Amino acid sequence: MKPIAHICTDFPTKFGIPRQSGLAETQGIIIFEKEYRTPEAFRGLEEFSHIWLLWEFSEAKRDKWQPTVRPPLLGGNKRMGVFATRSPFRPNPIGLSCVRLDKIELTSKYGTVLYIEGADLMDGTPIYDIKPYLAYTDSHPDAKGGFTEALGDNRLTVIIPDEIKAGFAENKLQSLLSILEQEPRPHYIDDSERVYGFMFAGYEIKFKVNGKTLTVVSTEKAE
Protein backbone atom coordinates (compact mmCIF):
# COMPACT_ATOMS: atom_id res chain seq x y z
CA MET A 1 0.00 0.00 0.00
CA LYS A 2 1.02 3.59 -0.47
CA PRO A 3 -0.45 6.86 0.81
CA ILE A 4 -3.05 8.54 -1.36
CA ALA A 5 -2.90 11.83 0.56
CA HIS A 6 -1.52 13.72 3.54
CA ILE A 7 -3.41 15.90 5.97
CA CYS A 8 -2.58 19.45 7.05
CA THR A 9 -3.61 20.26 10.64
CA ASP A 10 -2.67 22.70 13.40
CA PHE A 11 -0.73 20.01 15.31
CA PRO A 12 2.99 19.81 14.41
CA THR A 13 3.60 17.41 17.34
CA LYS A 14 1.67 14.58 18.98
CA PHE A 15 1.06 16.28 22.34
CA GLY A 16 -2.29 18.04 22.53
CA ILE A 17 -3.97 16.14 19.69
CA PRO A 18 -7.51 14.99 20.65
CA ARG A 19 -7.49 11.33 21.67
CA GLN A 20 -10.42 10.49 19.40
CA SER A 21 -11.89 11.99 16.26
CA GLY A 22 -14.95 14.20 16.58
CA LEU A 23 -14.26 15.27 20.17
CA ALA A 24 -12.88 18.69 19.26
CA GLU A 25 -13.69 21.27 16.59
CA THR A 26 -10.37 20.88 14.82
CA GLN A 27 -9.89 21.77 11.17
CA GLY A 28 -7.87 19.93 8.57
CA ILE A 29 -7.17 19.93 4.84
CA ILE A 30 -6.51 16.72 2.95
CA ILE A 31 -4.12 17.13 0.02
CA PHE A 32 -3.87 14.22 -2.40
CA GLU A 33 -0.89 12.79 -4.21
CA LYS A 34 -0.79 13.81 -7.87
CA GLU A 35 -2.14 10.55 -9.28
CA TYR A 36 -5.26 10.75 -7.07
CA ARG A 37 -6.25 14.36 -7.73
CA THR A 38 -8.56 13.68 -10.65
CA PRO A 39 -12.02 15.15 -9.97
CA GLU A 40 -13.73 11.94 -11.16
CA ALA A 41 -12.44 10.10 -8.09
CA PHE A 42 -14.57 12.36 -5.86
CA ARG A 43 -17.80 12.29 -7.86
CA GLY A 44 -20.71 11.92 -5.41
CA LEU A 45 -18.63 12.49 -2.27
CA GLU A 46 -20.16 15.94 -1.83
CA GLU A 47 -23.45 14.25 -0.94
CA PHE A 48 -22.01 12.83 2.32
CA SER A 49 -21.62 14.78 5.55
CA HIS A 50 -18.98 12.50 7.16
CA ILE A 51 -16.15 10.32 5.94
CA TRP A 52 -13.85 7.65 7.33
CA LEU A 53 -10.09 8.18 7.14
CA LEU A 54 -7.71 5.22 7.21
CA TRP A 55 -4.25 6.47 8.03
CA GLU A 56 -0.86 5.61 9.47
CA PHE A 57 0.48 6.26 12.97
CA SER A 58 3.63 7.50 11.25
CA GLU A 59 5.24 8.70 14.50
CA ALA A 60 4.44 5.58 16.51
CA LYS A 61 6.33 2.87 14.65
CA ARG A 62 8.05 0.12 16.65
CA ASP A 63 10.08 -2.93 15.66
CA LYS A 64 8.09 -5.18 18.00
CA TRP A 65 4.51 -5.17 19.18
CA GLN A 66 3.19 -5.91 22.67
CA PRO A 67 -0.08 -7.72 23.46
CA THR A 68 -1.01 -5.18 26.17
CA VAL A 69 -0.86 -1.40 26.37
CA ARG A 70 -1.60 1.29 28.97
CA PRO A 71 -4.62 3.35 27.85
CA PRO A 72 -4.31 7.03 28.86
CA LEU A 73 -8.00 7.04 29.89
CA LEU A 74 -7.12 4.58 32.66
CA GLY A 75 -4.38 6.82 33.99
CA GLY A 76 -1.60 4.97 32.24
CA ASN A 77 -1.25 2.50 35.11
CA LYS A 78 -3.50 -0.35 33.99
CA ARG A 79 -2.86 -2.70 31.09
CA MET A 80 -5.48 -3.77 28.56
CA GLY A 81 -5.24 -5.94 25.49
CA VAL A 82 -4.07 -3.94 22.49
CA PHE A 83 -7.13 -5.05 20.50
CA ALA A 84 -9.41 -3.65 23.24
CA THR A 85 -7.90 -0.18 22.82
CA ARG A 86 -7.21 2.45 20.20
CA SER A 87 -3.56 2.77 21.16
CA PRO A 88 -1.21 3.85 18.35
CA PHE A 89 1.20 1.06 19.31
CA ARG A 90 -0.28 -1.79 17.30
CA PRO A 91 0.94 -4.74 15.20
CA ASN A 92 0.22 -2.54 12.17
CA PRO A 93 0.21 1.25 12.80
CA ILE A 94 -3.21 1.85 11.23
CA GLY A 95 -5.52 4.61 12.45
CA LEU A 96 -9.24 5.05 11.81
CA SER A 97 -11.08 8.36 12.19
CA CYS A 98 -14.58 9.57 11.39
CA VAL A 99 -14.63 13.27 10.47
CA ARG A 100 -17.09 15.82 9.12
CA LEU A 101 -16.64 16.74 5.48
CA ASP A 102 -17.04 20.52 5.31
CA LYS A 103 -16.37 21.07 1.62
CA ILE A 104 -14.59 19.84 -1.48
CA GLU A 105 -12.58 22.36 -3.44
CA LEU A 106 -10.82 22.21 -6.79
CA THR A 107 -7.58 24.22 -6.55
CA SER A 108 -5.02 25.19 -9.17
CA LYS A 109 -2.06 24.03 -7.04
CA TYR A 110 -3.24 20.79 -5.43
CA GLY A 111 -6.21 19.74 -7.53
CA THR A 112 -9.11 18.41 -5.44
CA VAL A 113 -8.72 19.00 -1.69
CA LEU A 114 -11.02 18.12 1.20
CA TYR A 115 -11.76 20.42 4.13
CA ILE A 116 -12.70 18.46 7.24
CA GLU A 117 -13.56 18.99 10.91
CA GLY A 118 -12.93 16.84 13.96
CA ALA A 119 -9.65 15.21 12.94
CA ASP A 120 -7.30 13.70 15.53
CA LEU A 121 -4.27 13.59 13.23
CA MET A 122 -0.87 15.22 13.38
CA ASP A 123 0.15 17.54 10.56
CA GLY A 124 1.58 15.56 7.64
CA THR A 125 -0.02 12.24 8.58
CA PRO A 126 -0.25 9.91 5.56
CA ILE A 127 -3.75 8.77 4.58
CA TYR A 128 -4.28 5.43 2.84
CA ASP A 129 -7.98 5.50 2.05
CA ILE A 130 -11.19 7.50 2.38
CA LYS A 131 -14.67 6.01 2.58
CA PRO A 132 -18.08 7.62 3.14
CA TYR A 133 -19.69 7.27 6.56
CA LEU A 134 -23.06 5.50 6.32
CA ALA A 135 -25.31 6.14 9.31
CA TYR A 136 -27.62 3.21 8.57
CA THR A 137 -24.79 0.71 8.97
CA ASP A 138 -21.97 2.53 10.79
CA SER A 139 -24.03 3.91 13.68
CA HIS A 140 -24.89 1.59 16.58
CA PRO A 141 -26.52 3.59 19.42
CA ASP A 142 -26.88 0.47 21.57
CA ALA A 143 -23.20 -0.49 21.31
CA LYS A 144 -21.28 -1.16 24.54
CA GLY A 145 -18.28 1.00 25.36
CA GLY A 146 -16.31 -1.45 27.47
CA PHE A 147 -14.05 0.05 30.13
CA THR A 148 -14.65 3.57 28.76
CA GLU A 149 -18.27 3.64 30.00
CA ALA A 150 -17.18 3.94 33.63
CA LEU A 151 -15.13 7.07 32.95
CA GLY A 152 -18.04 9.47 32.45
CA ASP A 153 -17.64 13.02 31.20
CA ASN A 154 -14.14 14.23 32.10
CA ARG A 155 -14.29 17.56 30.33
CA LEU A 156 -12.57 20.47 32.05
CA THR A 157 -13.66 24.05 32.60
CA VAL A 158 -11.32 26.17 30.48
CA ILE A 159 -10.24 29.71 31.36
CA ILE A 160 -8.49 31.75 28.68
CA PRO A 161 -7.67 35.40 29.53
CA ASP A 162 -9.20 37.96 27.18
CA GLU A 163 -5.81 39.25 26.05
CA ILE A 164 -4.90 35.74 24.88
CA LYS A 165 -8.27 35.19 23.19
CA ALA A 166 -7.71 38.35 21.16
CA GLY A 167 -4.74 36.75 19.41
CA PHE A 168 -6.80 33.99 17.76
CA ALA A 169 -9.30 33.97 14.94
CA GLU A 170 -12.75 32.87 16.10
CA ASN A 171 -12.59 29.42 14.49
CA LYS A 172 -9.13 28.74 15.93
CA LEU A 173 -10.26 29.89 19.37
CA GLN A 174 -13.23 27.52 19.31
CA SER A 175 -10.94 24.70 18.24
CA LEU A 176 -8.53 25.48 21.07
CA LEU A 177 -11.33 25.55 23.65
CA SER A 178 -12.68 22.18 22.53
CA ILE A 179 -9.17 20.68 22.63
CA LEU A 180 -8.41 21.95 26.13
CA GLU A 181 -11.76 20.71 27.45
CA GLN A 182 -10.67 17.15 26.63
CA GLU A 183 -7.79 17.19 29.17
CA PRO A 184 -4.75 17.27 26.85
CA ARG A 185 -2.16 16.38 29.51
CA PRO A 186 -1.30 12.73 30.28
CA HIS A 187 -3.90 11.29 32.65
CA TYR A 188 -1.29 9.80 34.95
CA ILE A 189 0.13 13.26 35.81
CA ASP A 190 -1.66 15.40 38.39
CA ASP A 191 0.41 18.41 39.41
CA SER A 192 -1.50 21.66 39.84
CA GLU A 193 1.70 23.73 39.75
CA ARG A 194 3.17 22.22 36.63
CA VAL A 195 2.98 24.21 33.41
CA TYR A 196 2.25 22.10 30.34
CA GLY A 197 2.68 23.14 26.75
CA PHE A 198 1.83 22.02 23.24
CA MET A 199 1.97 23.44 19.75
CA PHE A 200 -1.25 24.53 18.06
CA ALA A 201 -1.84 26.76 15.02
CA GLY A 202 1.65 28.25 15.17
CA TYR A 203 1.62 28.93 18.91
CA GLU A 204 2.92 27.16 21.97
CA ILE A 205 -0.04 26.97 24.33
CA LYS A 206 0.98 26.87 28.00
CA PHE A 207 -1.51 25.92 30.70
CA LYS A 208 -2.06 24.64 34.23
CA VAL A 209 -4.71 22.26 35.56
CA ASN A 210 -6.12 22.48 39.07
CA GLY A 211 -8.83 19.92 39.73
CA LYS A 212 -11.37 20.25 36.93
CA THR A 213 -10.24 23.72 35.83
CA LEU A 214 -7.66 24.39 33.13
CA THR A 215 -6.17 27.86 32.85
CA VAL A 216 -4.14 29.06 29.88
CA VAL A 217 -1.22 31.03 31.33
CA SER A 218 0.49 32.17 28.12
CA THR A 219 0.87 31.68 24.38
CA GLU A 220 4.10 32.14 22.45
CA LYS A 221 4.46 32.43 18.68
CA ALA A 222 6.43 29.51 17.31
CA GLU A 223 9.72 30.39 15.68
Image (tube, grey):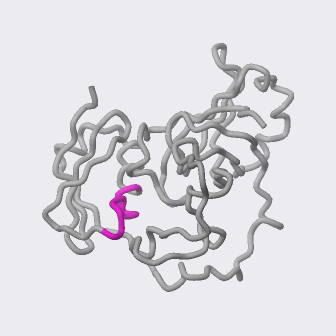
Q: Quadrant of residue 91?
A: bottom right
In-image side of 188 versus 45 (left or right)? left
* Outermost residue, bottom side: 150
Q: Residue furthest left?
A: 193
Q: Residue at x 66, y 14 (%)?
A: 108
Q: Which residues are magenta?
A: 179-188
Residue situated in front as seen by the camera: 60 or 204: 60
Q: Residue at x 79, y 41 (%)?
A: 45
User: In which image quadrant can residue 218 be found?
Assistant: top left
Does the magenta portion include 199? Answer: no
Residue at the spot 70% in from the left edge and 23% down from the top edge: 106
Q: Judge by depth and name the residue closer to the eye, 135 or 186.
A: 186
Q: Residue furthest front?
A: 64
Q: Horizontal placement of 206 versus 24: left or right?
A: left
Q: How many marks?
A: 0
Above-or-below relation of 44 to 195: above
> Which quadrant: the C terminus?
top left
Residue reaching furthest to the top: 108
Q: Return the x and y of residue 160 as percentages of the image width and height.
A: 22, 54
Residue at 16% across / 51% down in the picture?
Answer: 217
Task: Examine the residues drawn in magenta and state their main secondary structure.
Answer: loop
Q: Does residue 110 sit above or below 202 in this rendering?
A: above
Give percent across and percent down for residue 79. Answer: 50, 76
Q: Position of residue 154 (x, y in %)?
A: 39, 74
In percent of width and height, residue 68 lies at 57, 71
Whether 180 is among the magenta residues is yes
Q: Is residue 199 left or right of residue 6?
A: left
User: Measured along the vertical axis of the image, is residue 29 above or below residue 50?
Assistant: above
Q: Tell me the quarter of the image containing the N terminus.
A: top right
